[in-house]
Image (cartoon, rainbow, N blue to C red):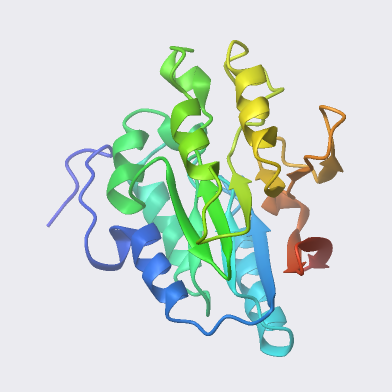
Amino acid sequence: MFDYSTYVVDFEGENKDVNQTNIERLLEKNVNDTIRIAFTGDTHRFYDEFEGFVNGVNNVNKTNPVDFVIHAGDIADFGLPQQYLWGNSFLLNLDIPYFVVLGNHDMVGNGSLAYSEMFGNFNFSFIYGGIKFVFINTNSREFNFNGEVPDINWLDSQLQPSNYFTNTVVIFHVPPMDADFDSTLEEDFHTTIAKYDNVLFTIHGHLHNHEVYTPYSDNVTYVNIYGVQYEKFNVIRIIDDQFEIETSEF
């Protein structure tokens, strides 16, 4: 009947187990030889822009179908359950499946509980169109740089070659060269990503601006996607083990 605390996590229905629900939705789709993914992130309290992003993706999808959306973290600003509800209320208006990775702002207060209840595990993956999409928690500072975040062993297990997929895409919020990433794990993290030579590219947010770069001077591409406040979003097209990056405005 009323809220007695701004920190109470009491999600239900369409606001629970969102990532798993959307995995199931996605796997019901017919897979073409081309995969198109729209990206946003760091939506924080940019609610007008967040609504604009959703409308922009739906409009693009009408003429050039998008398979799914990835939100690269910080759907909340202070980890408040109400901010999670507001954020997901926009994403629920998408005409296509969507997935949200854990951001550092999402964990403020008891935000980690809110994320778990709404979206599920901090680390998860799925295979679509022969590509494995690996989402990993890289918010080391929020775990006091305990040497366990990101979970390198889990990442390695996800990237090990398999007959079920040919390539992988790795998605996270904080990039490994950032001060919020555990510097003692930076080398192992990137070495693991490069280890099997099957990562098409990596995606991250946190920095808000857009950049495509190879910070370790090898063949692993890092893509920093636009924060929503720029009123732009990236669409990545994957075909024949290659990818192209487009930018749309809204």
User: Which of the 4 quarters of the picture holds residue 195?
Assistant: top right
Would residue 137 be found to the left or right of residue 191 on screen? left
**Residue 134 point in image, percent of width and height:** 53, 48
> Residue 194's spot in the image, x, y percent?
70, 35
Is residue 150 at least partly visible in the picture? no
x then y, percent, for residue 155: 50, 36
Q: In the figure, 149 relative to 4: above or below?
A: above
Quadrant assignment for the C terminus = bottom right
Q: Which residue is drawn at 72% across and 80% down?
A: 60
Residue at horizontal 74 percent and vertical 65 percent from the top: 235
Q: Nearer the viewer, residue 152 or 14?
A: 152
Camera-side residue of 202 and 209: 202
Q: Which residue is drawn at 43% across and 57% down?
A: 86
Q: Residue at (41%, 67%) from the top-left corner?
A: 22
Residue extending furthest toward the front: 163
The answer, for residue 178, to whether it is visible in the render is yes
**Please, which residue is most extreme toward the left here?**
1
User: Is 7 placed above or below 145 here?
Assistant: below
Number of marks: 0
Q: Which quarter shows the N terminus?
A: bottom left
Q: In which quarter of the image is residue 171?
A: top right
Residue located farthest toward the bottom when viewing the structure as drawn: 63
